[in-house]
Amino acid sequence: MNHEKIRLRNREEVPTDERLQEALGGSYGAYEAFVEDLGRYDIEQEWQWYTPHKAWYAKGQHYWTTVRGTRKEKNLYWLHVFEGCFVVAVWFKEKNRSEVLREQVSDKTKRLIQDAEATMNMSTFPVLFEVTGRESIADIYTLIGCKKRLEA
């Protein structure tokens, strides 16, 4: 992705539906469809300022309480807003790649998983979805569910 096309770059302007609609244009309906199901999957999305790229990013979190009463959290995805689209990045441990590939997702998503390059230390890899329509949302939620199970 071309980081020059990242939107939501004013630190003083917290993302609102209006700002998202302006940045996403025709892809805003896909964004609405994506966030509409967050509660059903027990995910909370929170916007944060990300200094390295000087832009707002959304973080999808899952919170739960252990048997002993400790509140735990797991980061499930990062969402970046670009001109006309948004990108959802779901990160996995490299050791789990073969299990992630067994998920019931489209061939296109399987290729994304196979082609994802591991980070320099080779311990994690991102599956990046460039979203302009609703067609990949089911696969994104499938991988988010996989991440919750694998790294619980």
Image: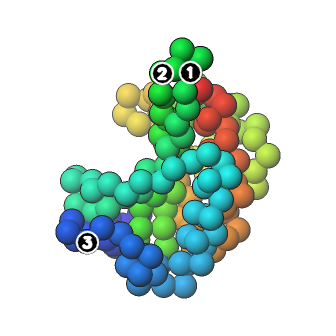
Give the residue type at disc 1.
Thr
Point 70% across, 48% down: residue:
142
Across and down, in percent, residue 20 comes to: 42, 76
Residues at marks 1 and 3, CA–CA distance in whole angstroms: 36 Å
Q: Is residue 143 above or below residue 56?
A: above
Which residue is more in the foreground, 110 or 63?
63
Could one spot residue 108 in this view of the protein?
no
Q: In the rendered structure, which disc, 1 or 3, sits on the residue that comes first in sequence?
A: 3
Which residue lies under the disc numbered 2?
70
**Disc 1 element:** loop
Disc 2 crowd rating (10 Å Cα; few below 14, some 14-19, many 20+) is few
Identify the residue at the far right of this view: 104
Identify the residue position indicated by label 1 in the image. Answer: 66
Amino acid type at mark 2: Thr
Q: Are marks 3 and 2 in contact (CB under 8 Å)?
A: no
Disc 3 is placed on an element classified as loop
Residue to which mark 3 is pinned: 13
Residues at marks 1 and 3 touching, judged by CB atoms closer than 8 Å: no
Q: Quadrant of residue 139?
A: bottom right
Residue nearest the viewer, comparing 46 with 139: 46
Residue 137, image x, y percentages? 66, 61
Give the residue furthest to the top.
68
